[in-house]
Image (spheres, helix red, strand yellow):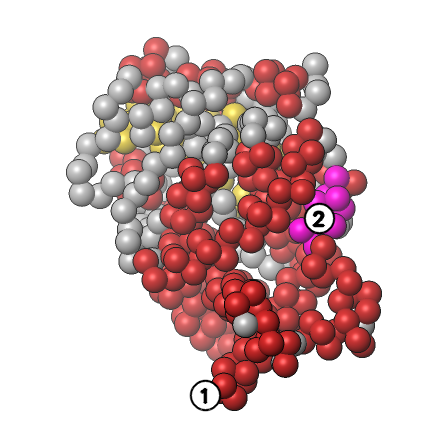
Amino acid sequence: MLLIIHKLLFIMQIIVFIYGMYLLTLALFGIRTRMTETSHAPKNRFSILIPAHNEEAVIHKLVQNLKQQKYPKHLYDIFVIADNCSDNTAQIARKNSARVLERFNDVRKGKGYALEWALRQLNLSKGHSHKNRDYDAVVIIDADNLVSDNFLDIMNNRLINGENVIQSYIDSKNPSDTWVTAAFSIMFWLNNRFTLMSRYNTGFSALLAGTGMCISADVLREIGWATSTLTEDLEYSTKALLHNYRTTYAHDARIYDEKPLNFFTSCRQRLRWARGQIDVAIKYLPKMLFQGIKEMSIVKIESALRLCQLFIIVFAGIILVTSLVQPQWVAITSIYLHMQSHIPFLGFTLPYMPYIVPIILLSLDHPPLKPFRYLLLFPIFAYSWYIIYFYALFTYKNNSWMPTKHTRDLDLNHVKSEFYGQG
């Protein structure tokens, strides 16, 4: 039995090491900053959808913020989807001149269902006639967000350049409120640079991230929106790629997202994401891998590998826990000890990656320095993913929707001056 355990641990270490080297190599391609290369006159008409469940504390600031876009006002409309609201979200949105779509459904709860319903109301779902072209694209923004004033201009340029599914840069609305918001912000900044940018630079498919998304009307009318998991963003990116629509990334279009203030809330939010991601992997990984091999598509094969990431994290967690409980079991077959002997530089630097990579990020994107005073605590946040994913693996069928309460009532000028030092 002990021999079997040693072999299993060795196999898991091999898998984790190879996968880690793959992600590290891919991340290197994110060092190059690739911005929107051409500028076009305003042409596309946008429908901006804001899913909102009891967001009376923040909705007015986002609507006012969106009205300040440097894009012709007649080329975009703002829709607030007041989804199962029991507060004044709808009234406040109307007072601020947004169009309101009110929805009440006690069974189909959650953002994905709200978006599917709203898109049907706007004739932007699968099967609707392409002749009825009220809008050329849909932008989806979370109710707690704020948006850079060039957002629609950048998305217009990208659509004209032939991109169809686009994710923007996700910044932080409150990066230094607490150590948790700092860690969450650093995580998103790293994702922007070393996941989204790297895949965009290599020609792979990036990921939608739930907010700051732009999708062309043609794509929506072809494949619809219907999503069934708790991570409708990852699911839609995956479905779009199966229909040969690659998700791209706009580094120069920015949204500011409110981060959870305490660790428990962050864990609850990440647990919902983890459950959804596992659900997506189970439902779509085999099909993506089969289609990628059949078509000899490196983009789809890489996407399938990306969906494996959740299970690799679980393997890494098992190895980590085993090394703490029974260190001799791991030491016998330790790839890391072997690496320390034969590749000293790599063996020395790998354990410090949670510190090294954020420092590299500072020189590339120049995020605010204040959150980095909590950098010593960042590994606690990062390694807590192991526990979250492990628990999610056994509870992923729990599709109960857990909304996150938003309270940071800030406008963009306040955010830039308080957190980013921009007057």
Q: Determine the secondary structure under disc 2.
A: helix
Q: Earlier in the sequence, mark 2 or mark 1?
A: 1
Relative to 148, 339 lies left or right: right
Q: Residue furthest top?
A: 95
Asked if residue 354 is among those painted magenta in the image, a careful observer would answer yes
Query: Taking the image as drawn, is residue 124 in sight?
Result: yes
User: Which residue sits at x=25%, y=41%?
Assistant: 109
Q: Determine the secondary structure under disc 1.
A: loop
Query: Which residue has dot 1 on it?
Result: 1
Quadrant of the rendered image containing residue 256: top right
Query: Which residue has dot 2 on it?
Result: 355
Type of residue at label 2? Tyr
Q: Nearer the viewer, mark 2 or mark 1?
A: 1
User: Which residues, given as a range, are shown in magenta?
Assistant: 353-362
- Residue 58, given in percent of the width and then of the height, sits at 42, 20
* Residues packed near mark 2 inside 10 Å, few (<14), some (14 to 19) or many (20 plus): some
Relative to 360, 223 lies left or right: left
